[in-house]
Amino acid sequence: MPRIAVALALAASLFVPARTIAATHAEKIDALIHSYNELRQFNGSALVAEKGRVILRKGYGMANMEWRIPNAPDTKFRIASNTKQFTSLLIMQLVSEGRVGLDDKITKYLPTYRKDTGDKITVRNLLTHTSGIPEYGNNKPEWTEKGRDPHSVADFVREYAAGDLEFEPGTQFRYTNSGYVLLGAIIEAVTGKAYEEVLQERIFGPLGMKDSGYDHAETVIRNRAGGYRLTPDGYRNATYLDMSNLYAAGAIYSTVDDLFKWDRALYTDKLLDEAHRKVMWTPVRNRYAFGEVVGKMTLHDGKTEVSFIAHDGGTAGFHAVQLRMPDSQDLVLLLDNASDDKSVDQLGSGIIDILHGIQPPPPKQPLREELIKTMDASGVPAALARYRELKAREPQKWDFNEQVLNGLGYDALERGEVDGAIDAFRLNVEEYPKAWNVYDSLADAYEVDGDREMALANYKKSLELNPRSSNGEEAVKRLQQPAGPADVPTLARYAGTYRLSSGGELIVIREAGKLVLQTPGSQRADLVTDSATRFHRGDGRSSIDFASDGRSLVLHQDGSDVSGKRVK
């Protein structure tokens, strides 16, 4: 063969069309997503674009598990905190029109907001989580209960977004939904229209995002996915949450197709001019800009670094991930309705690896089910031995996250195996010595065991690592007070059935010199005396304040306060 022919043949063999590369990437990405789906670590819809062109658009798993309806590209998911980027853009549109100033105090637009704090906080502070306003989920103990009820914007702002400042505005970063609730209120105040109406007029309508909207539970929304949570016993329906409470911080639903339209528009002046987009995507603290995290990420080869604009969000059974690569115009969209947020985030970074020709790490197998199976067969010590064995032998195969041993410990407590629970929590402290929750859980077990000294020490350590832990704060106060046992006649006064404001019932039984708590469908639990009117469950999961006449009570559980009236 002539030399020139050889050269041409060699050149042809080296030339791989871009379409073939994209197809290869799509196949690898599809295989990676399937591997996550098979391990129940992704259940949803995915869209991946390479250099602005869609190479994968597909559903995985079930949108509705009861009716076995599969996920698809047009399935509608709650996108949770990805809502914040839409709220930020609406604010920036008003800024570009001269109707809002980024450095204006929020009281200029919300004149009824408390002036002592509102006069210190700017619109920019709200956008960048530097306002100092407490997160509403932590601000009110009853939020878990109240989150099921709808609230007007004015009522929500007054009750949940107007707490005392945790720090001086602009001096720290602390992620909070409360600030974005206030941004929604500002949008309404300036435009004279409802937040969802402004969304439709300024973003969804112009972009043709016909499958996106503001989530109302009572509205029949075609192709809406159900939200689920995975437990060791299988999938369960997620806890109900009225989405009006997430408002401008997290109440939007959408599809991967609509979010692709949104992504493409952000490379143009259709919604916002380039100068204001640049301001919107300039990070202030902790890589956070306006409704987006902006920075660089190192891929799994340890050397490739790419710029990104991203956000994720999770609520009531849903998790949404958006990863934008502005330099290459690559895009990863993952909308999930049943999986753990950590696994979905890992899947997103693995897809970015593939787009850059890097082999991503495979998903790790969930460990908790393996340990529960061992515990059922041979007890807690065998389960802990199995944990250590797998950690030594196959550390890359299994997911050794903090919640594995934490869940095992509480399972042991439920079965009355207190020593085993303490051993599980102590091992978790060894594994995660800088995690506040492992100390809180160990303290719970020591308290069940009657070791108040060790319980107090671990609650204090938990508070040291997380001063915002309401459970730890309450437990320290409780354990620093000497127990004051109630007399037998007083115990008899509290026995009975109580109807809770949440709709459930508590049954309190007196047995010998103690009270026993029984809730329908759950195991019995001894109540430990703290004072003549206050008691707490032996496993530390809740406490009860009785009225002195025994006619009512207040149940403190999971950060909420639920009242109850005695009915018999």
Image (tube, grey):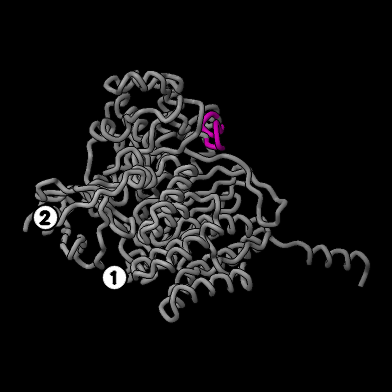
| Outermost residue, left side | 568
Viewer-proximal residue among 382 and 297? 382
Residue 118 vertical placement versus 519 (above, below): above
The residues colored magenta run 279-288
Looking at the image, which residue is at 50% across and 30% down? 172
Question: Which corner quadrant holds the C terminus?
Answer: bottom left
Residue 278 vertical placement versus 509 (above, below): above
Left or right of 405 on screen, residue 107: left
Residue 99 vertical placement versus 380 (above, below): above
Q: Nearer the viewer, mark 1 or mark 2?
A: 2
Question: Which corner quadrant holds the N terminus?
Answer: bottom right
Residue 474 vertical placement versus 390 (above, below): above
Residue 324: x percent and y percent?
55, 46
**Tag 1: residue type?**
Trp
Looking at the image, which residue is at 59% across and 42% down? 326
| Residue to which mark 1 is pinned | 67
Residue 249: x percent and y percent?
37, 40
Residue 216 appears in the figure: no
Mark drawn on residue 352: none
- Label 1 residue SS: loop
Residue 306 appears in the figure: yes
- Label 2 residue SS: helix
Q: CA distance from mark 1 to mark 2?
A: 54 Å
User: Tag 1: Cα neighbours inside 10 Å, few (<14), some, or many (≥20)?
Assistant: few
Based on the picture, tell me whether residue 252 belongs to the magenta stretch.
no
Mark drawn on residue 489: 2
